[in-house]
Amino acid sequence: MNLILATTSPRRIDIFKMLNITFKVIPPNINENINEKNPEELVKKLSLIKAKSIKEKGIIIAADTIVYFNGKIFGKPKDYDEAYNMLKTLSANWHTVYTGVTILTENETITFCEKTNVKFKPLTDELIKYYINTSKPFDKAGAYGIQELGAILVEKIEGDFYNVMGFPISKVWDILWDRGIINASTGKTSGGWCGKTF
Ligand SMILES: Cc1cn([C@H]2C[C@H](O)[C@@H](COP(=O)(O)OP(=O)(O)OP(=O)(O)O)O2)c(=O)[nH]c1=O
């Protein structure tokens, strides 16, 4: 069965490659500006819209990630100033990363949200400026990438690391394994990513 990852996120592709199964990547074609203030509902709805935007037949998996702090949703920063203000606000505080996932199979629509709490160290202006200039985190929710240099901002986390990066892969695996979508043969015979389709 065609396994399709509906994403443009290099991080999500990297995480999925860890499973060593054959899959295709097709970019979702959606408008991410929906009017939803509840973080869990927002990421679930966006992951569903992304998955449903794929017309090709197969098992379709999509995700959406935001950072949430003090009642505010932090998406991808539009510029340097927004990235600076996000990191300044998150400094020395706990925030929550919400990732919504949708898995469309032939007869099921599975949508769930996974949360990870992240505590930042106290961040000096100098470190924040260095981080943004070095990492240019404009394609990452909350203006940081925990899997890259963003690791130096983090004091500790409670929950799934990969969920912060953009994909709670352990939970996704369980859903696919429990339904026999991934099984002993696909895990052994498939040689990983079969090449991008975009
Ligand atoms: C918090 C955090 C986010 N991110 C990334 C994951 C996502 O790529 C991005 C959140 O934006 P999303 O809108 O969830 O995803 P995307 O637009 O990059 O890709 P697509 O919608 O096509 O799947 O932030 C990290 O890479 N590391 C982190 O630590």
Image: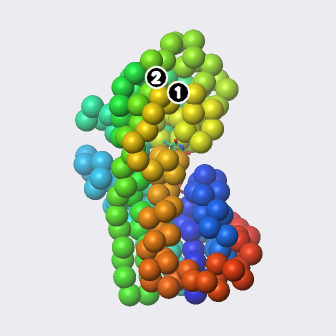
Q: Position of residue 187 (x, y in %)?
A: 64, 78
Using a 10 Å C-alpha cutoff, classify the residue at mark 1 as few (fewer than 14 neighbours), some (14 to 19) or many (20 or more): many
Position of 112 with respect to 103 (left or right) is left
Q: Name the residue nearer the viewer: 178 or 125.
A: 178
Disc 1 to disc 2: CB gap under 8 Å: yes
On-image quarter of the C terminus: bottom right
Q: From this viewpoint, is residue 145 visible?
A: yes
Please name whichever residue, 96 or 142, is drawn nearer the observer in this view of the structure.
96
Residue drawn at x 50%, y 30% as measured from the top left = 154
Q: Amino acid at mark 1?
A: Leu
Mark 2 residue's CB less than 8 Å from ligand 1: no
Residue 153 tag number: 1
The residue drawn where x is 36% and y is 26% is: 93
Secondary structure state at the residue bearing disc 1: helix
Does residue 44 lie above or below 77 as drawn? below
| SS under mark 2 | loop
Q: Which residue is mark 2?
A: 121
Query: Whole-percent x and y of residue 107?
Result: 38, 87
**Could you tell me the amino acid type at mark 2?**
Lys
Between the C-alphas of marks 1 and 2, the distance is 6 Å
Residue name at image x 46 percent, y 22 percent: 121
Q: How far across and how far down the image is residue 46, in percent? A: 39, 59
Residue 158 vs residue 49, the one in the foreground: 158
How many residues crowd mark 2 within 10 Å: few (<14), some (14–19), many (20+)? some
Q: Which quarter of the figure has residue 139?
A: top right
Badge number at residue 89: none
Instruction: Compare marks 1 and 2 and give the one earlier in the sequence.
Output: 2
